[in-house]
């Protein structure tokens, strides 16, 4: 019945129609309707490849529904609905259009069956999303958006190059499991790695997300990186070296998260860390691991959005999201605090919350395949997540020292969006089988074993005790107004400095050389003028006579050569 | 009518606020902390009373998860604190190419005070 309806086109049509609808409740309702209509083809279509068309003799598949793409497009649709509900009050047409186009592109990419379709939507997410950053309309956000856009577009260009090379090598554009024997696949992997914020390619994430608007950050948090996770799971499941890459990703952001002051940036670092768990799952590649990755992406999108929503609500009411400026807000924003704590409990993987039932799959899968060091790192990262996201975020925003701020509670639409998201976080934790039943593989997994629950509680309680101990002894670093250098320093400070030095050096050398050359030229001119100038010796001779003399010499020379050259 | 409604919602709010007000009392926070420590110790002792299903030998060490959680988190914070010495810069380090030193634009906010 709806076989002609592509979910991504629903979003694009919505984005196109928006400006013609009066900006107010009518338009806000239309925006909320879009994800719901987009769900219809997802839920009613049978698995398979449809909406194909032929371009230059190649069949492009725009709608490939299978168990993996279903999980991701479903959670993208849910995330779109919840974050747009959160943004109900926004009357900025630019943000409304960007949000719909962005979510639609992400869903389109998740449903793409070939590399060209994937590329088109891949760039779509880049171009649409940057407007959520520019919507802040400050000099800083303009520059940040530019940096973000350059890196996102670069990822797309690399993807296109990879697809072209891959096509030359294999004659296929199908987006399935890719073999790393060809060069093309490496380019494609690099492109995914950029969007997935692999270590050293990660910093666009922490740079840009906190620079968006209150609602923009919530929307940004859901799509781009999880699309990359989906693409990696589709193309590179079981690629061994993704395991150490993922492990490194879980590890280094937690150190930054501890000392970061901007709570939205703290959350971005922990987003990066959560992606690491998913990348490890993809690297392990077993059915349990891929299920774990898909499940973790699902629950992660929800609790991460919830955390961004709660910090966003604080920002919305107080004008700041910095730990050093906040504290004591539970008194006047109790609901926001409760929802934030639910998000925190979910990301920390407390039993009965969503993170627990998904993250434990990845840890089990890594352990089952004997990845001991990786398992130890993931365990450390799990404890660290509780430390910096689970405790730090709610603690510095709502408790800690009283900042004296007494903001009003968040508006109803934000509370409703947070409430629904919080409900889903708990529901997934309490009834994991509903989520498990839609995962890519049929694998029996029970997260609620006594070993699992008890060891997890031990880990969490003692990382809480560590937090408490460090707080009480004053070792815990206080929140300070500051920025911390990360890899973006290389292209924001070092390279410009190096470039500046090179420019200075080259121009100095050039001007020296030019001066030297000018001086020599002048000297030669002076010397010549001495002989040939009006006052020179040569000028005293009759020019014609001079000419004849030279001609005679020349003739003589020719004669001499002839003479010598005779046989 | 409207007043009545707001009274009601204040009621739910104030239950949450009241139930959390202990955080501003130093001695109650102390009690809470030691309570957490006590629960943590009990959880660790549970290791003696059930059969752990483990993947690695390490997990069989008594209280492994507790010790690992505590020491690794402590190490995390100490290391991060040390990182500040090298990595921390003032808020306007990247300004004006960065939003860190900017105020969040007011059109994107709705500052409102709670009536207290």
Image (cartoon, coloured by chain):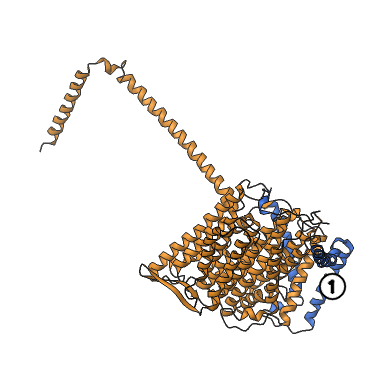
Quarter of the view holding residue A307:
bottom right
Residue B31 place in picture, x, y as percent: 87, 67
Q: Is residue B111 left or right of residue A80?
A: right
| Chain corresponding to blue in the figure | B
Residue A381 place in picture, x, y as percent: 67, 68
Identify which residue is drawn at 55% across, 46% down.
Answer: A496
Q: Nearer the viewer, residue A546 or A457?
A: A457
Q: Nearer the viewer, residue A306 or B53?
A: A306
Quadrant placement of the C terminus of chain B: bottom right
Quadrant placement of the N terminus of chain B: bottom right
Q: Nearer the viewer, residue A409 or A1?
A: A1
Residue at the left extreme?
A: A567
Chain label for disc 1: B
Q: Which residue lies under the disc numbered 1?
A: B38
Q: Is residue B51 left or right of residue A159?
A: right
Identify which residue is drawn at 70% across, 52% down.
Answer: B85
Q: Is residue A220 visible?
A: no
Q: Is residue A231 left or right of residue A461?
A: left
Q: Is residue A39 visible?
A: yes
Residue A302 place in picture, x, y as percent: 65, 69
**Residue A301 higher or lower than A509, as above or below:** below
Name the colour assigned to chain A in the rendering. orange
Identify which residue is drawn at 53% across, 61% down.
Answer: A17
Q: Residues within 10 Å of mark 1 (few under 14, many from 20)?
A: few
Quarter of the view holding residue A80:
bottom right
Residue A287 place in picture, x, y as percent: 57, 79
Residue at the right extreme?
A: B27
């Amino acid at each position: 019945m709806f076989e002609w309806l592509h979910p991504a086109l629903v979003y694009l049509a919505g984005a196109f129609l928006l400006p013609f609808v009066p900006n107010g409740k009518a338009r806000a309702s239309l925006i909320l309707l879009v994800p719901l209509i987009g769900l219809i083809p997802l839920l009613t279509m049978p698995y398979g490849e449809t909406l194909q068309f032929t371009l230059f003799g190649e069949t492009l598949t725009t709608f490939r529904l299978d168990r993996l793409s279903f999980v991701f497009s479903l959670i993208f649709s849910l995330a779109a609905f919840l974050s747009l509900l959160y943004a109900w009050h926004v009357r900025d047409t630019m943000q409304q259009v960007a949000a719909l186009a962005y979510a639609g592109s992400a869903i389109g990419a998740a449903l793409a069956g070939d590399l060209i379709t994937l590329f088109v939507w891949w760039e779509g997410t880049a171009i649409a999303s940057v407007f959520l950053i520019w919507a802040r309309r400050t000099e800083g956000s303009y520059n940040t958006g530019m940096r973000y856009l350059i890196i996102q577009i670069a990822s797309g260009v690399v993807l296109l190059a990879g697809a072209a090379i891959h096509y030359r090598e294999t004659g296929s554009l199908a987006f399935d499991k890719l073999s790393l024997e060809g060069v093309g696949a490496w380019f494609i992997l690099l492109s995914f790695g950029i969007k997935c914020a692999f270590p050293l390619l990660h910093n666009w994430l922490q740079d840009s997300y906190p620079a968006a608007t209150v609602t923009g950050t919530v929307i940004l948090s859901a799509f781009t990186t999880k699309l990359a996770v989906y693409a990696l799971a589709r193309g590179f499941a079981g690629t061994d070296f993704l395991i150490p890459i993922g492990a490194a990703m879980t590890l280094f952001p937690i150190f930054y998260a501890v000392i970061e002051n901007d709570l939205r940036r703290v959350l971005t670092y922990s987003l990066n860390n959560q992606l690491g768990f998913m990348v490890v799952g993809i690297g392990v590649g077993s059915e349990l691991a891929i299920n774990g990755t898909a499940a973790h992406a699902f629950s992660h999108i929800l609790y991460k959005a919830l955390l961004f929503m709660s910090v966003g609500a604080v920002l919305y009411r107080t004008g700041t999201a910095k730990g050093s400026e906040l504290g004591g807000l539970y008194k006047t924003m109790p609901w926001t605090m409760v929802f934030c704590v639910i998000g925190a409990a979910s990301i920390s993987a407390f039993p009965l919350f969503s993170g627990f039932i998904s993250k434990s799959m990845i840890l089990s899968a890594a352990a089952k395949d004997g990845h001991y060091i990786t398992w130890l790192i993931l365990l450390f990262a799990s404890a660290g997540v509780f430390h910096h996201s689970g405790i730090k975020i709610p603690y510095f925003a709502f408790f800690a020292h009283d900042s004296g701020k007494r903001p009003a509670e968040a508006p109803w639409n934000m509370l409703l969006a947070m409430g629904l998201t919080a409900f889903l976080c708990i529901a997934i934790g309490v009834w994991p089988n509903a989520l498990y039943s839609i995962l890519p593989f049929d694998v029996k997994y029970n997260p609620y074993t006594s070993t699992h629950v008890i060891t997890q509680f031990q880990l969490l309680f003692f990382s809480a005790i560590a937090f408490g101990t460090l707080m009480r002894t004053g070792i815990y670093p206080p929140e300070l107004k500051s920025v911390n250098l990360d890899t973006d320093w290389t292209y924001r400070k070092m390279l410009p400095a190096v470039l500046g030095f090179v420019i200075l050096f080259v121009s100095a050398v050039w001007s020296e050389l030019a001066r030297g050359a000018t001086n020599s030229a002048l000297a030669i001119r002076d010397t010549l003028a001495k002989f040939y100038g009006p006052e020179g010796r040569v000028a005293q001779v009759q020019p014609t006579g001079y000419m004849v003399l030279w001609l005679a010499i020349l003739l003589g020379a020719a004669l001499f050569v002839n003479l010598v050259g005779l046989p | 009518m409207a007043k009545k409604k707001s009274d009601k919602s204040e009621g739910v709010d104030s239950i949450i606020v009241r139930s959390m007000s202990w955080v501003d009392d130093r001695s109650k926070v102390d009690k809470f902390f030691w309570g957490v420590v006590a629960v943590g110790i009990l959880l660790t002792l549970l290791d003696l009373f059930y059969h752990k299903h483990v993947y690695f030998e390490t997990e069989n060490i008594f209280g492994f998860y507790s010790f690992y959680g505590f020491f690794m988190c402590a190490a995390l914070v100490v290391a991060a604190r040390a990182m500040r010495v090298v990595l921390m810069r003032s808020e306007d380090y990247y300004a004006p190419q960065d939003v860190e030193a900017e105020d969040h634009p007011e059109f994107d906010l709705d500052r409102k005070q709670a009536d207290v």
